[in-house]
Image (cartoon, coloured by chain):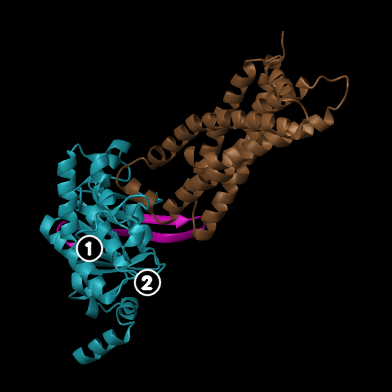
Chain colours: A brown, B cyan
Amino acid sequence: MGYDSLFIVLIVSVFLGAVTTLQTAYNLISPLIPDPVISLVVRDMTILELSPTIIAIVYAGKVGSNIAGELGTMRITEQIDALEVMGINAISYLVLPKIIASVLMFPLLVILSAFFAIYSGYLTAVVSGVISGTDYLTGIQMDFNEFGVSFAMIKAVVYGYIVASISAYKGFFTSGGALEVGQSSTNAVTSSCIGILAADFSLAYLLAPFLTPS
Amino acid sequence: MIEVQNISKSFGDKQVLFDVSGNFEKGKCNLIIGMSGTGKSVLLKCMVALLPTDTGNVLYDNRDFTHGDKQLQTDVRREIGMLFQGGALFDSKSVEQNVMFPLEILTKMTPEEKLDRVNFCLERVGLENVNNKMPSEISGGMKKRVGIARAMVNNPNYLFCDEPNSGLDPQTSIRIDNLIKEITDEYKITTVVVTHDMNSVLEIGDHIIYIYEGRKLWEGDNKHIMDSGVKELDDFVFANRMMRMVKDKSL
């Protein structure tokens, strides 16, 4: 689940970090704004929003569709019926491990994503010369609020749960044939994305005040 | 013995089963036959509680499975082996793991005991040296036989088979039929087979229930099915040319 998503997560993260650095740098060119502010913005955007939320949407597309497709296929080929006839609780056996795995693995992906995005931002800054490496490193240490990392981890756990549970629900209750399995996969991704964005807003509303220095 | 009492089932406005009753005896191959879309598989799924019934109940050796508590349902289900239409083998598991699965989940056997039992069952259905093959690597007939091995691995008291011959060539069909019959006789289990295959009806039909448009229209055995006197059943039995020729010759 997490391991198979590593490649796509790293690719997306590297480009996220690079693009965010360039865009922020070109928008903050001013003698009044010190250069380290650019990497401060990159750091906070990456940790608070880009790594958890954008990667969650990528994760929904990869893992969510996979879960829905797998369970949907199991449903239409009577594999779930076979489990139930054996007296096995199919939801506990098939769905619960996926939710637990997702809740445990997605935060690790977010940590890796944030690391690679910030590091690729550094390389982009140095290679393109928009700011110096020293300024970039100064900026990412400036005014650091540890709660930002906790906030990102809370988001990651919630998103991991949302993607796995919505996708498992869509797949588990598939009925029909191959066409419906495809529809379940698509619905799983769509619903997961909506769930992620709604949770993003709710969590920001609830937890963002804790980011403000008292 | 399995007793089905007054089962009715509908999906929305469409009623599929109308007050169906019947007894399925131990040590016999009990067949539920009828045309496609007549409610045979729905009846089978109601019997194993994969579908809830609207009315009626199912008794397994006098245990009320339909209205019993969850523990009773789980206990009964652990005495059931079921062969599904497409085999329903778990795609991600090898043949050996598929057959071993019920033992892994439901028993406390040692790994050696489990492997011995799996090999015995695979040998019993005529499949040797396929332990490590994946379901995608074996033929439809082999999948059905693996399905039978998985259904019998836990020594079930009740064996259900949903259209075991569908999609198989005549020789493989007969082989599957014979296997089901042998297992039933050997282990004295209650076997219920849903089929519309006339070869199966004539070969293994110790006790037959004919379902027509959701209603039980006839009950008997394979010796009397040819002279039932029920028009709808005659139309079903003598639908193909070979059966009509057999009928004409006997006349």
Q: Which residue is mark 1?
A: B30
* Residue found at x 31% / y 71%: B168
Q: Tell which of B227 and B29 is nearer to you.
A: B29
Discs 1, 2 touching: Cβ within 8 Å: no
What main secondary structure does the magenta stretch of the protein show?
strand
List the single residue furthest toward the top.
A214
User: In terms of sequence position, does the residue under pointer 1 or pointer 2 come before the other?
Assistant: 1
* Residue found at x 57% / y 24%: A153
The residue type indicated by label 2 comes to: Met
Q: Could you tell me residue A48's position as x and y percent?
A: 66, 26
Q: Is A135 left or right of B64, judged from the image as shown?
A: right
> 10 Å neighbourhood of mark 1: few (<14), some, or many (≥20)?
many
Residue A60 in view of the camera: yes
Name the chain under label 2: B
Label 2 element class: loop
Residue B2 in view of the camera: no
Would residue B193 be counted in the magenta stretch? no
> 10 Å neighbourhood of mark 2: few (<14), some, or many (≥20)?
some
* Residue found at x 54% / y 47%: A65
Would residue B8 be counted in the magenta stretch? yes
Label 1 and label 2: CA atoms lie apart by: 17 Å
> What's the mark number on residue B35?
2
The residue type indicated by label 1 comes to: Asn
- Quadrant of the image occupied by residue A149: top right
- Quadrant of the image occupied by residue B7: bottom left
Label 1 element class: strand
Q: Is B214 left or right of B179, judged from the image as shown?
A: right
Q: Could you tell me residue A189's position as x and y percent?
A: 59, 45
Query: Where does the magenta region start and end?
Result: B7-29
